[in-house]
Amino acid sequence: MKKKAFALFLGFTMAAALLAGCGGGSADTSGEPADTAASGDYGEGYVFKHGFDLDYPPYSYIDDDGNVGGFDVEMAQAVCDYYGWEYEAVPFNWDAKDAELNAGSCDCIWSGFTLNGREDDYLWSKAYSDNTQMIMVKKDSGIETLDDLAGKTVGVQTSTSAYDLLNDEEGQKELCDSFASLEVYETYTIAFNDLKAGAIDAIAIDVTSGNYLMSGEEDYQFLDEELGSEQYAIGFRKDDTELCDLINAALDALAEDGTYDQIGQKYPEIYDFLCLNK
C-alpha cells in the first residue's frame, strides 16, 4: 500500500475532507442501536471523531487517493453504523496523539494502541487484539539471535511500545545499549524502506505490523526470540466514561453478530491475534 508523504497529508487535513464513509468501508451492521446511545450527547447523528496514526497499516492508513482504511478504521466505522453516528477521521503523526486527544480534536486514540504500561494514562476500552514485539531482519543478514544485534543499527517508530520497551530499564534497555545505534523513525514504512536499502540492520516492531510490511516480500523474517507481549485497546480521556462504555457495548455487539470477525478476516496479518471476548 503506497502512502502519501507527510507534506501531502498536511494538505489533505487542511482540505477537511475527513467525513463519514471515506475509504475502507465498514461492514453492514443491521442490528438495532443500543438504548444507551439515545441519551446524553451521544444520540443518533453524533459526530464520532476517530483519532489514529496516519501510517500504521494494517490498523490505519491514508492511501494515495486520500482515503482512510485499516482494521481499526473499519471497526470505528462499524461502531458508527451501529449507533447511527457520523464518522469523522482524524489522522495524525503518532507522536502528536496526546496533543490531539487533549485538545479535543478527536474522541479517542484507536490505532494499534498498546494499553500495557499506560493503564493509568488513559481510560481504556476492553482489549481487542493481542500482539508481540519482535525483531525483523533480512534473511541473509547473519543476525539469528538478539545477541547478534550487538554493534548493529536498529530502527524503531517513535512513540511506540517497541520504542518504550527498548528504553525501559525493566524492559530491553540492556539489549538496546548493545546496539551501535537506535534510529527513530516517524513511521515503520520509512524504517522498512531503510532496511531494504541497507541503511539499518534490523527493526524492532510489533508482529502484526511487521507481517503487513513483509507480505509479498520473501527476503525478510523475524527472529525467534520475542522482545515482549502486549494488548491493543482504545484510549479515551479519563472523564469520558459514557463514551467508553458505549464503545465497549458496541464492540460486544459487533463481536456477537460476526462483524468483528468479518472485518478481521480482511486483514490476515492480524486475524489470529484478535482477542475480543475470547
Image (cartoon, helix red, strand yellow):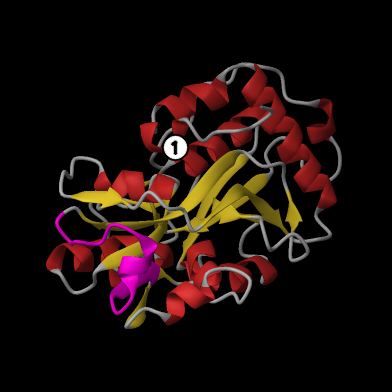
User: Residue 269 or 135: which is nearer the viewer?
Assistant: 135
Which residue is rendered at x = 57% and y = 42% of the image? 130
Q: Which residue is painted at 21% across and 69% down in the image? A: 194
* Image quadrant containing the C terminus: top right
Q: Position of residue 161 (x, y in %)?
A: 54, 63
Which segment is the magenta one?
140-156
Using residue 153 as the reference point, say whether residue 206 is left or right of it: right
Instruction: Please say whether residue 60 is one of the residues in the magenta stretch.
Output: no
Q: Which residue is drawn at 63% across and 24% down?
A: 255
Q: Position of residue 208 (x, y in %)?
A: 42, 45
Examine the image and state in which quarter residue 8 appears.
Answer: bottom left
Q: What is the secondary structure assignment of the residue under circle 1?
A: helix
Residue found 38% across the figure and 31% down from its top = 268
Horizontal side, residue 102 vs residue 240: left or right: left
Whether residue 21 appears in this view of the structure is no
Query: Crowdedness of circle 1 by 10 Å Cα count: few (<14), some, many (20+)?
Result: many
Q: In this view, does 221 lie above or below 265?
A: below
Give whichever of 164, 247 is nearer the camera.
Answer: 164
Pinpoint residue 168: horizontal percent, then vertical percent.
Answer: 59, 74
- According to the picture, the residue beneath numbered tag 1 turns out to be 270
The amino acid beneath tag 1 is Ile
Q: Can residue 25 be seen in this view?
A: yes
Across and down, in percent, residue 84 comes to 65, 31
Residue 20 left/right relative to 125 = left
How many numbered discs sit on the rendered protein?
1
Q: Using the image as rendered, state which of residue 101 and residue 118 is in the foreground.
A: 118
Q: In which quarter of the image is residue 204?
A: bottom left
Q: Vertically, is 242 above or below 26?
A: below
